[in-house]
Structures are given as C-alpha cells and as structure tokens.
Image (spheres, helix red, strand yellow):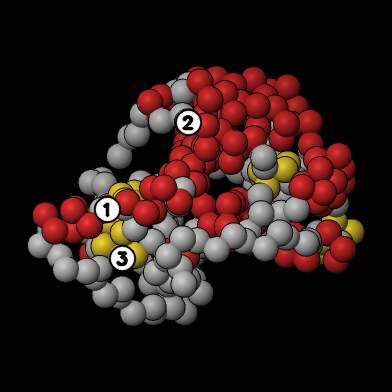
Amino acid sequence: MTVDYGNLPFEEAEKFFRDKVRIPTRRWDDLKHGMHARGFMIAGAQRDDMLCDFQTAIKKAIEQGTTLQEFRNDFNVIVNRYGWSYNGGQGWRTRVIYDTNLRTSYMAGRYKQMTDPDVLAYRPYWMYRHNACTHPRPQHVAWNGLVLRHDDDFWSSHFPPNGWGCHCDVEPQSKRDMDRMGKTGPDQAPPLVIDPKTGEPAGIGKGWGYNVGEAAWGKQLSQKVMDDWKAQGSRAWQRITPGNWREADRPERLPVDMPKARPGSG
C-alpha cells in the first residue's frame, strides 16, 4: 500500500521528530522498543554529520510533505557526499527509512492528540483499524474493528505501527459512536500470546511490541537530560566496543519525569 504523507504533517508529529537525539548505530536493533521514540538512527550510519543530514531530509518530509522520490534524491546526495556503503538496494532502503520515520511520527502525534484530556472526556474508546494492503497480516485483519478503552493494556503493545510497513490506525470513539455500533461497552481484549520466535505478542513484528506514543509522551525524559543529550550529540551514545553501550549512558538508566495520570485511568 502506498501512502501519500503530503496531507499528514501536524504539530504533534513534527515535535515528536524534532525532539529525537541522533544516535550512531551499527544495527537496527541496537535500540530497543521505546528507545526508538527518543533517538534517531539509521542502521549502519555511524557518523553524526551524516545522520544530521539524513535527519534534516526526513524532517523536511514530515514538515513539508515531500514525497518518497524527493527523499530518494536527498538520500543519493547524502550517500555520495560521505561515500557511505549501505546494505540493501536503494529502493528498498529508502522506502524503509522514509516510511518508518513518517509513520511512527504520525502515530506518535495521533496518540498525543487522542490523549488530550478534552478529547478523552468525549472519546474514551479507541478502535483498531486495519488499512487494506496487498499482503495483509492475518492478526492485524483480525483486530480490525476492535474497540477498547484508551487505557486498556492492549494499547501498550498493540498501538500501531505493529511491524515494518504496517499502516494500521486507531480511531477514537465516543459513547454515541458506540451506540451506533450497537455496543453497550468496550470489547474484550484478545489474550496476550507471546511468539517465542520474536519475543513479541503474536502478530507484532520483532522490535515493534511497544506504543510509540506512550514511549514519546507518557514518560517524558527530564528537560535536563534532553538538554544534555543534545549538547553532547553522538558522544552521549559512544560505545567502548561494538555492541556495548557505556553503562552510564544507557537510555533506560536515564532519569525520567513521572508520567501524568491519564484521565479516567483510575
């Protein structure tokens, strides 16, 4: 499925991406789950200046709605500038980078909008929506139309995107919407079954079993930490040896502000 992101940019999505800290990495899974909501990385890109150029190109796509082809043009210029040898074909690699960053930014922004207290007061239920595509994931199709409260644990692991190329969405629902659907209350969340091959809930791609919006907005890193990260740049993530972060700089060890209680969460 090809998605035109030209009509999607909005402030919450833009802020989500602007707040990311550049993190040089060797592999896509050097960052785990919610770390991706805090850091900007491209697997194999280990130069901060090159990452900065890529981040600028993606930022332009998010804020100005530039197309995949325009990003590919920028990508080629950056690759030639630094002589970067990357894995995978140009077409596949650029689509993954473009689609993943724009989709996660969009969904993080959607989460921010839907968890606004005024919105939650009127639309406290969320519906999972599967968008038609050439090769649908059976589990994603099965979740289509599922309606749960916004604070159901299901959303902590199943809020889209739920895999590479996933374009599922979530729609907020009001009591009136529920009445029109003939529902007297939310549905029962499906049982959580972990796929032993991926370590993620069944139907979720490896590395995607987290809520990008919750990771971005639910637990805010303290402003001091964010300022320190930005001041240090890539040095904040320097590794002593491949595969080993400096213990003091592991993102899960960094202090966070306590998340604000969500309205109606009890």
Q: Earlier in the sequence, mark 2 or mark 1?
A: 2
Task: Reply above or below: 228 against 75.
Answer: below
Judge the density around disc 1: few (<14), some (14-19), many (≥20) Cα neighbours within 10 Å: many
Residue 235 visible here: yes
Residue depicted at x 72% and y 43%: 21
Labels 2 and 1 touching (C-beta < 8 A)? no
Q: Mark 3 points at which residue?
A: 148
| Total number of numbered discs in the rendering | 3
Residue depicted at x 40% and y 24%: 6
State the CA–CA distance, disc 2 to disc 1: 21 Å
Q: Mark 2 points at which residue?
A: 10
Label 3 sits on a secondary structure element that is strand
Tell me the kind of residue under disc 1.
Gln
Judge the density around disc 3: few (<14), some (14-19), many (≥20) Cα neighbours within 10 Å: many
Q: Is residue 35 left or right of residue 7?
A: right
Labels 2 and 3 touching (C-beta < 8 A)? no
Q: In this view, does 59 lie to the left or right of 96?
A: right
Residue 247 in the image, given as x and y percentages of width and height = 85, 66
28 or 83, which lies in front? 28
Tell me the kind of residue under disc 3.
Leu
User: In the rendered image, which quarter is residue 56 located in?
Assistant: top right
Residue depicted at x 51% and y 74%: 199
Labels 3 and 1 touching (C-beta < 8 A)? no
Residue depicted at x 11% and y 54%: 180
Question: Which disc number belongs to residue 173?
Answer: 1
Q: Which of marks 2 and 3 is nearer the N terminus?
A: 2
Residue 88 in the image, given as x and y percentages of width and height = 55, 42
Residue 109 in the image, given as x and y percentages of width and height = 49, 42
161 or 148, which lies in front? 148
Residue 209 in the image, given as x and y percentages of width and height = 49, 64
State the CA–CA distance, disc 3 to disc 1: 9 Å
